[in-house]
Amino acid sequence: MASDYSSTLNDLNPKVLKCAYAIRGEIVTHAQVLALCDHPLLLDRRETKALFSADSIERAIQILDQIPCRATGAYSHSQGIKGLRDKIASGIEARDGFPADPNDIFLTDGASPAVNSMDLQVHMMMQLLIGSENDGILCPIPQYPLYSASITLHGGTHISYYLDEETGWALEISELENQLKTARSRGVNVKALVVINPGNPTGRVLAEANQREIVEFCRKEGLVLLADEVYQENVYAPDKQFHSFKKISRSMGFGEKDISLVSFHSASKGYYGECGKRGGYMEFTGFSPEIREQIYKLASVNLCSNISGQILASLIMSPPKVGDESYESFSAEKDAILSSLARRAKILEDAFNSLEGVTCYKAEGALYSFPRINLPDKAIKAAEEAKTAPDAFYAWRLLNATGIVVVSGSGFGQRPGTWHFRCTILPQEEKIPAIVSRFTQFHKQFMDEFRG
């Protein structure tokens, strides 16, 4: 029964319920033609075995066997190719230690060249949950701006909860409770909570105990937990470990009917960063069959995600294993990338903390640092005269002077009266000392210019 679940049809946007898309309805589902990989004829050539590892060839054959028409340009099932969803479900199960159902997984990509898999995932969820401006979503501040933009685009109410910078961007349950209470007192129907772990832009990795508190909060308050877990492989702090919210909820003894959870993952992020492939997935758990029909309908409107992206998403969740020919080279490359990112994060953290008026907490994960900068009053006044935010003013001056691009904290949200900028840790490691040198020189000149 739908009423046994924490979310019901009454929680959905009524426009979704009214939507119909007959060409992907019940009848066509049974006649669906699945798509294939690119260039299958390569498998018949002698030189292929010399150029590709045996396990890579075997994996390609397995995928081709799952996609009868043998060409990536065809349509697939709206949720994605069943065999690839099987692989992802197996990967989730291996990661979490709890069962995963391929029918809970929706493979996604972007709807246009400007939209990647995460964009489409978030827009789909906001379309599903927001029916009017009275519907609200709790989002962190600072946050990846996609969430606030999507909520606004779909006509909902963005409810900010502030991460605690003084404790290294911790997520305090008391803050969630206060913001939820305030929103409900204004008559807002709060539908969901967004949590980004590891954090973007903060780089914070949530502690397991904190995740348990978040799960209990959502269960108690009847909120859908929207878990952005796209940087799950990028954890640098030795005392931290990534745990999916699904794993946490199941380890607490909560089942399908106790909490509604959507997990996001993307091939555009992580240590692989295949942004152009437009591949990712959403795992839906804790939703009634009636709601799942509506989710499938929304997926059907987009027909299906691109096959190359689907394949990539499955490979991310089922990498080479011990004994495979490519395992050692894969592991060496992955470890080298993650180790280098950890070193880059540390170098930048130390550099920022050495600057006058700048404090930067450790980037425990993801791909970013989010330093706080205390700007002189004279600089703040100059920014006001330029009709721009003070941190944006600083970022513009930095760009013009050095060619270094950072994004102002005002673009991600921040407590009033504080200023930040987001800096990626992605420049090549050998180039970072020169970047630090230019940044340090600029900052000293900027502070000297606007001091007193």
Image: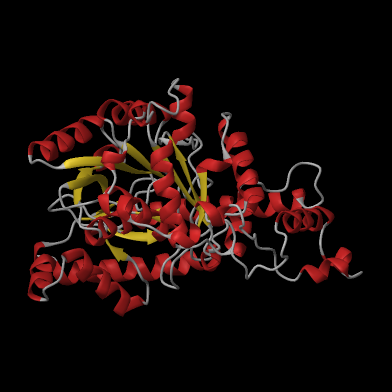
Q: Is residue 425 visible?
A: no
In which quadrant is the C terminus drawn? bottom left
Q: Position of residue 403 (x, y in %)?
A: 37, 77
Q: Determine the image quadrant of residue 92.
A: top right
Residue at the bottom extreme of this rendering: 400
The picture places residue 244, in percent across and down from the top left corner, at: 47, 36
Q: Can residue 55 be seen at all in this image of the molecule?
A: yes
Tell whether 159 sits left or right of 41. left
The number of callouts visible is 0
Residue 231: x and y in percent read 48, 49
Q: Is residue 366 above or below residue 23?
A: above
Q: Quadrant of the N terminus?
A: top left
The residue furthest right is 46
Q: As displayed, is residue 442 above or below residue 270?
A: below
Kindly give the residue lying farthest to the top in the view shown.
Answer: 253
Give the residue displayed 42% in from the left and 33% down from the top: 286
Query: Percent from the top left, x then y, of residue 41?
Result: 81, 71
Dividing the picture into quadrants, the one containing residue 189 is top left
For residue 162, which quarter of the picture?
Answer: top left
